[in-house]
Amino acid sequence: MQENSIKMYEDILDSFMGGVVYIDLSMRILVFNLGAERVSGISRKMALNRPLHEVFHRDPWFTDLMKDTLGGERTYTEHEGSIHRTFAAPLAVSLSTGVVFSKDGFVEGALAFLKTPGLGVKALEGFSPQGEKLSGMSFFAAELVHEIRNPLGGIRAAAQLLSRKAGDSVLTDYTDIIIRETDRLDTMLKEVAAFTAPRREVNKEINIHRLLDSVIFLIFGNNSQVIVKKEYDPSLPPLSGDDGALVQVFLNLLKNAAEAIGEDGNISVVTRILTDFHMSGTSKKAARMVSIEITDNGCGIAADDMDKIFTPFFTTKKQGSGLGMALSLKIVREQGGYLNIESTVGVGTRVRVLLPAAY
Ligand SMILES: Nc1ncnc2c1ncn2[C@@H]1O[C@H](COP(=O)(O)OP(=O)(O)OP(=O)(O)O)[C@@H](O)[C@H]1O
Ligand SMILES: [Mg+2]
């Protein structure tokens, strides 16, 4: 294929949701559409003109199948496999391949079509294998919240009344417990309700640094400089989305970090723009991505717990509701972003949030 015709095909292919990769006889990548970026998490700039086996070095099966195709052994239709991604867990794909012939009938290259069980929002599913658990529970959650909150209000009011009647007697210790615990349940139910409430489509321009600063101040107050090290990229573009929802995300994540560190632990908050890496989440438009990393040197998460932390109500804390991570993941996805967590017991935890920039 000629260079200029490749460019034209690329433009057409970008509007196609699947991943398209074209390699020449030497297995160099000449076409890498937006869908291929989405599937692999590798930018076009990183992929183009490089050997297939280098770019997909963690997926040798892909190179093998393309070699078969190019060598005329066979082509593949919807071959099941999985592709490793830069910022996410491996993604299940189906690969179809085809040979491209020149005008005079010689093999010129090979094409790969990578399909996922539904690109776009679905492409995020593999990011956390627990994600699917969210959808099932939202059906009954709204009903349940409603049914529990009403009598809870009654119980609280009754306890208050009792407390007033009991005066200074020892009974108020018990009524205080009832009131405190009903309040805690109520807060938890409000969080559950957040799963089911239809999200408003908000597209405000957000200064993420200002948002992070306010959340950090809210949690750590005047002590924040001692505990939180900020490394903000001053050239960061604004984000576009729901600022209220993002406050919730970073409140949850920073609260978790704060709860994980001991007396003299540290937290770092690093922001940067990912150049040449644009992904589209819920919107069809490709956007540059902003990365916000929250790293703590706290207790870390046991390997056995890692696949449970996004499950609603999973908590290792006495007073935890276990909804912080599940809710954060849901919101980040709704904003067209990604959330990824890495942790080592006794060393610490790093949570990375990728969100689309406004421009
Ligand atoms: N930074 C972290 N360091 C160590 N463990 C963490 C961290 N973040 C999350 N976890 C683990 O994941 C679990 C779930 O977190 P999540 O925020 O969903 O709930 P929670 O913090 O227990 O309760 P809630 O946030 O509702 O008060 C936590 O109980 C904890 O075990
Ligand atoms: Mg939490």
Image (tube, grey):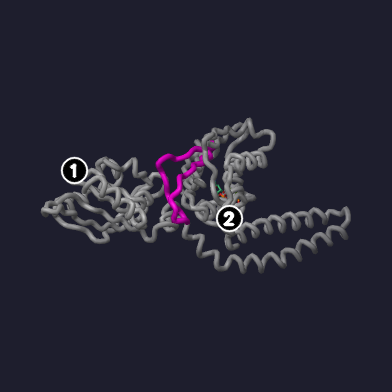
Q: Name the secondary structure under disc 1.
A: loop
Q: Residues within 10 Å of mark 1 (few under 14, many from 20)?
A: few
Which stretch appears magenta? 271-296
Distance between mark 2 and mark 1 Cα atoms? 48 Å
Q: In which quadrant of the rendered view does residue 80 lie?
A: bottom left
Vertical relation: 357 (above or below) 17:
above
Q: Badge 1 is on which residue? A: 26
Instruction: Inspect this view and state whether residue 324 appears.
Output: yes
Q: Observer-nearest residue: 220 or 359?
A: 359
- The disc labelled 1 sits on which kind of residue? Ser
Instruction: Inspect this view and state whether residue 130 appears.
Output: no
Residue 91 in picture, x, y percent from top left? 37, 53
Judged left or right of residue 223, residue 358 is left
Q: Residues within 10 Å of mark 2 (few under 14, many from 20)?
A: few
Q: Badge 2 is on which residue? A: 202
Vertical relation: 151 (above or below) 313:
below
Q: Residue at x 47, y 60 (%)?
A: 132
- The disc labelled 2 sits on which kind of residue? Val
Vertical relation: 103 (above or below) 218:
below
Q: Is residue 289 magenta?
A: yes
Q: Is residue 354 magenta?
A: no
Judged left or right of residue 89, residue 161 is right
Residue 319 in picture, x, y percent from top left? 64, 50
Q: Earlier in the sequence, mark 2 or mark 1?
A: 1
Residue 313 in picture, x, y percent from top left? 57, 56
Q: Name the secondary structure under disc 2.
A: loop
